Amino acid sequence: MQHDAVTERRNNIAPIPFEADAPHLKIVGELPRELNGTLYRNGPNPQFDSPGAHWFVGDGMLHAFHLENGRASYRNRWVRTPKWLAEHDAGRALFGGFGRKLPDAPANLTDGGVANTNIIFHAGKLLALEEAHPPTEIEPGTLATCGYHNYQGRVAGSFTAHPKVDPVTGELVFFGYNAAGPLTPALSYGSIDASGKATRFERFEAPYASMVHDFIVTANHVLFPILPITGSMERAMSGRPPYAWEPDKGAYVGVMKRNGTAKDIVWFRSEACYVFHVMNAWEDGDRIVAHVMQFEEAPLFPHPDGRPTDPEKSRARHCRWTFDLSGNTDRFQQTYLDDLTGEFPRIDDRRAGLKSRHGWYACANPRLPMFGALSGIVHVDGNGRRLGHYLLPAGDTISEPVFVERSKDAPEGDGWLLAVVWRARENRSDLAVFNATDIEAGPAALVQLGHRVPDGFHGNWVGAA
Ligand SMILES: [Fe+2]
């Protein structure tokens, strides 16, 4: 029967229909005593089925693994967004894809935010993020939803799910796309200081309207990738895909000095590609080097006429981008560093924006037929060379690996890697704890859940104070 269950359930996308508190979870192996804190993870978990809704727009569900003195507990909660509350009251879905309301939804219901993409801790606040709406503040212990946080009214509109914290200043640097309304080419850019005060917020025009999922921040520069998953109101209004793959638009990356303004942005060009996630980037003399997971063609989004993109090309590989700031060229270089399919790159965040010598990402197993499913982890050096590689048992899948340093002053990369693993045969999940510099040895400890955590997006570790 187990075999049948695996055959029928080929993936771990479907939502779970409950919220739970699980104290004293079973642990296999030994949980490092130094791991005191909570891993928060976010991802789509639709409260109700909504016909045709994209995976990206499911209601956010938070999963918190609390580790303390070698013990572990777990709690999950939906984020109580205005959409979630209205649908909960109605007992059915009121929204379809990308903020589109279903025809019978109440006219006064306008906010389709789902807060489902990332969860970060900055300036004493735990914030659930989703790129089309402001951050949603979450109470760290209970996971109760406190509501939108707009920095005393100084930040408005969309706010990326991938802001960067400067490890030197503690500043949170962010941007937003669709900043002048849905499917517009306007971007916003801003910063929040280490005390939680908004210090900057401005808007500018990008070359075209596109989905801008992540960006690049170094010690002195900020880079805005405009890549051709284009947004089109005209398509949306005529029932065609609001977002579509249009490689003819080309790839642009805007480079701005952090102490400059949007007027000074220099646009670099290159071959069409798509990038959801940046691993890290740094300055090297007159150059900026960025490590990204690059797709030749966009995954998950069709051509403008609805045709799917080429699955062989719609997979990401570790790629280095190089920008020459000396003024010799407006082209940037793209160099693939590995042939493995991978996603969800992370680093030791104490090196964010600075040259780093360690990175990790989830990867596919090229020997398995379900090629593309993320079922392993790779550890790489600052040139993308593999330092370690671990593959799960066949059928199991893994989420984003989150690095936790052994102590505040431990050397870069010295610590653990935490990732949620789906056990396909048992149809439940483990929190796997790896030694970050020896992932080949496999998990040093597994925290076992009785249920599964659906595939999701991003998370972060918040250490005990
Ligand atoms: Fe992301």
Image: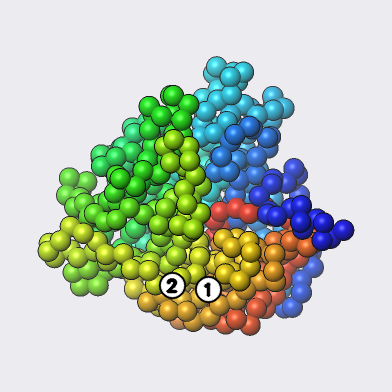
Name which residue lies at 36% across and 54% down.
Answer: 273
Residue at the spot of label 1:
378
Question: Which amino acid, by three-letter code, is at mark 2?
Answer: Asp
Q: Position of residue 417 (x, y in %)?
A: 57, 71
Q: Which of 145 and 305 is in front in this view?
A: 305
Quadrant location of the C terminus in the rendered image: bottom right
Residue 90: quarter of image: top right
Q: Is residue 453 left or right of residue 273?
A: right
Taking 110 as reference, is 1 above or below it?
Answer: below
Taking 110 as reference, is 293 above or below it?
Answer: below
Name which residue lies at 29% across and 55% down.
Answer: 271
Marks 2 and 1 in Cβ contact (< 8 Å) = yes
Q: In this view, does 464 lie to the left or right of 24?
A: left
Q: Position of residue 74 (x, y in %)?
A: 72, 58
Question: Which amino acid, by three-letter code, is at mark 1?
Answer: Val
Residue at the spot of label 2:
338
Name which residue lies at 54% across and 43% down.
Answer: 56
Q: Which of 436 and 193 is in front in this view?
A: 436
Q: Where is residue 340 in the image (x, y as percent from the top left)?
A: 49, 69
Give the farthest residue toward the right.
Answer: 1
Residue 67: quarter of image: bottom right
